[in-house]
Amino acid sequence: MAERDEGIVKSLKVVIIGGGPAGLAVAGRLSKKGIPFVLLEQSGAIANSWIQHYDRLHLHTVKHLSSLPHKEFPAAYPTYVPKDLLVKYYKNYAKEYGIKPVYHSQVVSIERSAKNKWSLFTKEGKTYQSSYVVVATGTNRKVNIPTFKNQNSFAGQIIHSREYKNPSPFVNKKVLVVGMGNTGAEISLDLSNHKIETFLSLRSEINVIPRDLNGRPVQVTAKLLDKLPFGIGNWLGARIRDFYFGDLSKYGIKRSKLHPIEQLKTTGKTPVIDIGTISQIKKGKIKVVPEIDYLMEGAAHFKDGSQE
């Protein structure tokens, strides 16, 4: 155990900030090597962001490429792991590797305190000192909430996707989903599958790839295509998408000029992994609309002059 003196925790080798998958992965590796560490988590639970996600969420990546170090997913788990089983796996991982986070510890600043030493200050008044700090706070930790012109006059409800759980509150309502990333695409699918009139506002050019093709995960195929020289993999991937989806521009979806792998490597943005949204768009059960220009009491007005 580390010594505690007037709120200062001393003699720590490593402090990990964040008890999500990345923090757990680092902690598991350190535990395996016998290197002492402390893991600080601002919430009261391991993988808290995953716990908060919407009900139907599954990993879009195959399980054999998604597990943490030293521990594969149980054989009984499906290829695409649902969030509840994922959280169970993370909790079992922490138990197996003796990872005991210090919960409700929100780090607000880190300073160099001495040669080869760092001081970490928490909102709760604790100071941790260590030789190494691993920041594993997640890319989606802070919500991004845009504002729209005349937003205060809008009579409907505006929520962030983090607050979305399932379609139940939206029965007999019209819903406009803003943004066609993986979350926006899947929430739109969830709503439309429950016969809720759904609109999807799309501003940017995007890449859409099927999750599976002829029963084979596209992620596995993409890793093989990425190894081909002279851009052959990108060319083949584009032909596959053309064949599978056809021309999506007539539905209001403009394809990115970057190939999916290039997009991921250069921008960090994940392509939209389709699990049925495109089919619903083609059937007219999800209507793609342009970027929002402004809101009025009972309507959204879009950049092309149209409104709903």
Image: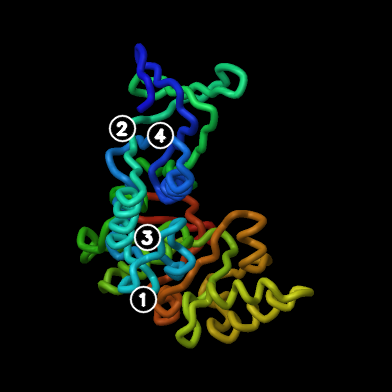
Image point 59% across, 74% down: which residue?
222
Residue 211 visible in the snapshot: yes
For label 1, the residue is 285
For label 4, the residue is 38
Whichever of callouts 4 and 3 sits on the residue coming sooner in the sequence is 4
Image point 57% across, 78% down: which residue?
221
Residue 159 visible in the snapshot: no
Q: Which circle marks residue 176 in the picture?
A: 3
Circle 2 SS class: loop
Whichever of callouts 2 and 3 sits on the residue coming sooner in the sequence is 2
Look at discs 4 and 1 and give the one toward the viewer: 4
Frontmost residue, 291 versus 305: 291
For label 2, the residue is 104
Circle 1 SS class: loop
Tell me where residue 8 appears, x and y as whole percent. Answer: 40, 17
Distance in Å between CA atoms under marks 4 and 2: 13 Å
